[in-house]
Structures are given as C-alpha cells and as structure tokens.
Image: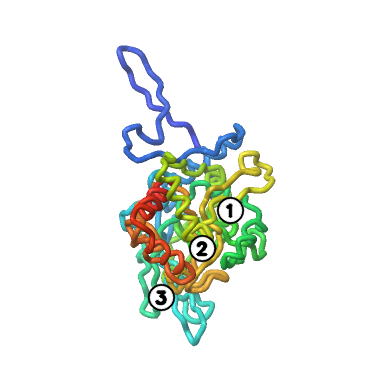
C-alpha cells in the first residue's frame, strides 16, 4: 500500500557570512499567471492543514514505483487542472484533454468495456503508457469499433466544496426550468446519488471524483476503485504493474478530496456599470434560467461551507442544447450536458466541453436546443447590450 510522508523542504545558502534559512516555495513570485489556489475563508487551523497537505498530494508527480500506470493520462492531478493555477482547467497544450469513445450497437449504448460486447479498455482512453524495462505496454488509441469519439476539457475545481454542500432538494428545485438530474452510482455507498460534477454530472461527490481520477487518469488503484484498467482491454503484461492493489491506501484520495473541498472560488472582477447592465441582459434573454446565479449551501459541519451563497451560475442539471457528444454516463443521454458553472469564466481561454471555442461569443452561438430561444434573443439585441452581456461574462 502506498503511504506518503510529507516533509518540509528547506533551502540553505550563505550570504555575507550568515547562514540564512529559507522555506522552499511551491511557486515562484515571477510566475505571470494569476494564483487562484487559495483556501476558503474561515477554515480552522486543522482544515487549513488538510487543504495544504491535499494541495501537496494534488501537485505531486506520481511514479511507477507508487503505482502509476500502466496506462494513464497524467502523472499528477495538477497536470490536467492547471489554468490559471492549480485547481483550474487544462492548459492549452494538447496533452491532457481526455478522449471518450463508445458506439451504439443494436440500439444500445456500448461503452466498449465488455459490459455490452467487446472490451476495448472502456470509454475513457488512457493516452500515455509507462516506459520501464521489460514492459512494452502501449498507450491506448481509438479502436476501429468506436463510432463515437468525444474530446473533453478538464473542468475547473475552484469552489467545488461549496457545490458539494448545496442540498439535493435545492438543486432539484430548478427542474421547472427543464433541467433533469443525473443519478449515478457512488461506489463509496453503493447507492445511486445525485450527480453534481463532470460534464454530464456523472460524479456525485468529491471523494468519488478523486478516486475515479486516481484510477482512470493516473492508473492508481484505491479502495473505491480497486481494479486496474486493462490497456485497450488486454491483460496487463508481467512487469508492467509491480505494486499491490490498492496502490493508494485511501490517504491520497482523501488528500485530493480535502484540497478540492476547501478550495475557494475565483473572485469576481470589478463590477462596472457595463457589467451590471450585462447581468440584467443575461437574465432578460433567459440565460439565467439554466445558469442559475446563486444557490445556498445547507447546514454543514464545516463552518466555512455552512449556509453560504454559491454564486456558480448553474442549475447543475442536464440539458440538451444541441452540443451533445453521443456519450452516455449514468442517466445522461448522448445529447445531454450539465449546465457548466460560469464562475471563474474570465480565467479560462477555451470554452464548451470540447474546448473548441476560444471566444465567448463563439460559445454562445453554439447554443441551440433548449437554449435556442435565449440564443435568438441574444442575437436580436442591440450591439451595446451584447457588449454589456460579454462584459458581464468576462467579470465572472
């Protein structure tokens, strides 16, 4: 089992004959990117320690000796959640964007994991492979049987703990706007629970999110996800997996969970008169019916999460806006996507599930289906109101 001991690292150097002790910094002050990797306000000292320990886990580069692989997508969580700082979305480097594959077989959705027909390694491709002596495993590629291929960008995690703390009844109260919940299996409880996270609300809790990512993105088994992925559906070769399962004893997953649960949302940009006008336009054209501006958390044992406003601009429900990718997850059908939260939008440089829109107006123009009326009203706006709406989005 994998158990880590974190040690404080120090850098020593001599200057003018005096030995000066400096705490090694996780990040340099010269970085130009905005640092949003901050804890929620009002955490206790113990919770703040859990946040910082979890951040260490989140940023740590995993190795083969710790269970990485044999196939994987990243060597650390922070590799895929890095823009503009740890906890964000994927940087535009074309390395970590995940690819999901599947097909429709005789009218049934087939995730290519052996549950319906053939096993080609499941619907998520692991696009990298370990390189160690005696192991010739190869990274997964899109198999010829896959007729559905979908690119997905990493979702930002800022404020995730506040989202988890919103009562289920509050989220279900938004169904009058046409949204639908996605109930998914939570392996920690064995029960179907309301999905909140992921592009299709296919994950119920941050602990499940952590365990799932540890296995499927890094290839590290853990108590909730104890079975190795079979590369392209084939047996794992001898010498390609030398660490006993579970490769993480649960402490790593707990660390990831603590980091995300206590991670603060991104702060708003300045509220100018144009931004305030844009928020009025946003509501008037109907965007706020799905991108619900605020929900409240309920009572929580963590004071920093208890009875707090969550200004996420999402109903956390499924909608068909004409951008579906064909992939089914839980009760989410191929045309469905969860309304993505818009807080932190101004810190992203790619939009929509496939990250193929690099301008907000282009992302707006892709809305159809249930959002067609709102799009038509947006298109019919005078230019000054359209500019105001975009200024509002760029303030989030």
Q: Is residue 171 visible?
A: yes
Answer with the quarter of the image where residue 172 lies.
Answer: bottom right
Residue 305 lies left or right of residue 376; in this view the side is right
Residue 47 is tagged as: none
Q: Is residue 62 visible?
A: no
- Which is more toward the observer, 217 or 7? 217
Q: Which residue is mark 1?
A: 207
Q: How is the image coloured?
A: rainbow
For this orientation, the residue located farthest to the bottom is 106
Dot 1 alpha-carbon crowd within 10 angstroms: few under 14, some 14 to 19, many 20 or more? many
- Comparing marks 1 and 3, which lies closer to the viewer? 3
Identify which residue is drawn at 38% across, 18% down.
20
State yes or no: discs 2 and 3 in contact (Cβ < 8 Å). no
- Which is more toward the observer, 180 or 230? 180
Which is more N-terminal, label 3 or label 1? 3
Q: Which residue is mark 3?
A: 148
**What is the x, y in percent for residue 212?**
52, 59
Instruction: State how far apart marks 1 and 2 are (Cα).
Output: 19 Å
Q: Which residue is mark 2?
A: 338
């Amino acid at each position: 089992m994998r158990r880590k001991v974190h040690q404080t690292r120090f850098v020593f150097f001599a200057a003018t004959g005096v030995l000066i002790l400096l705490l090694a910094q996780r990040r340099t002050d010269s970085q130009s990117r905005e640092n949003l990797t901050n804890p929620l306000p009002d955490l206790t000292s113990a919770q703040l320690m859990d946040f910082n320990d979890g951040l260490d886990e989140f940023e740590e580069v995993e190795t083969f000796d710790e269970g990485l692989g044999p196939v994987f997508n990243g060597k650390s969580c922070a590799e895929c959640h890095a823009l503009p700082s740890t906890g964000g979305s994927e940087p535009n480097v074309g390395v970590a964007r995940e690819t999901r594959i599947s097909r429709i077989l005789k009218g049934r959705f087939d995730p290519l994991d052996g549950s319906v027909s053939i096993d080609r390694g499941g619907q998520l491709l692991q696009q990298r492979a370990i390189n160690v002596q005696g192991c010739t495993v190869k990274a997964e590629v899109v198999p010829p049987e896959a007729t559905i291929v979908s690119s997905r960008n990493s979702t930002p995690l800022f404020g995730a703990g506040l989202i988890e703390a919103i009562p289920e009844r509050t989220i279900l109260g938004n169904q009058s706007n046409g949204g639908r919940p996605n109930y998914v299996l939570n392996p920690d409880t064995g029960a179907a629970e309301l999905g909140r996270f992921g592009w299709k609300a296919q994950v119920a809790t941050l602990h499940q999110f952590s365990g799932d990512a540890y296995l499927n993105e890094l290839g590290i088994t853990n108590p909730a996800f104890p079975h190795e992925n079979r590369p392209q559906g084939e047996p794992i070769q001898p010498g390609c997996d030398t660490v006993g399962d579970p490769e993480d004893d649960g402490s790593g997953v707990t660390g990831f969970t603590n980091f995300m649960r206590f991670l603060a949302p991104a702060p708003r940009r300045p509220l100018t008169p144009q931004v305030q006008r844009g928020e009025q336009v946003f509501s008037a054209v109907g965007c706020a019916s799905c991108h619900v501006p605020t929900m409240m958390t309920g009572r929580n044992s963590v004071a920093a999460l208890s009875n707090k406003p969550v200004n996420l601009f999402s109903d956390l429900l499924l909608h068909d806006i004409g951008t579906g990718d064909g992939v089914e997850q839980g009760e989410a059908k191929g045309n469905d996507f969860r309304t993505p939260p818009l807080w932190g939008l101004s810190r992203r440089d790619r939009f929509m599930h496939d990250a193929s829109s690099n301008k907000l107006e282009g992302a707006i123009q892709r809305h159809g289906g249930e959002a067609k009326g709102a799009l038509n009203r947006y298109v019919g706006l005078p230019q000054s109101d359209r500019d105001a709406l975009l200024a509002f989005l760029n303030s989030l």
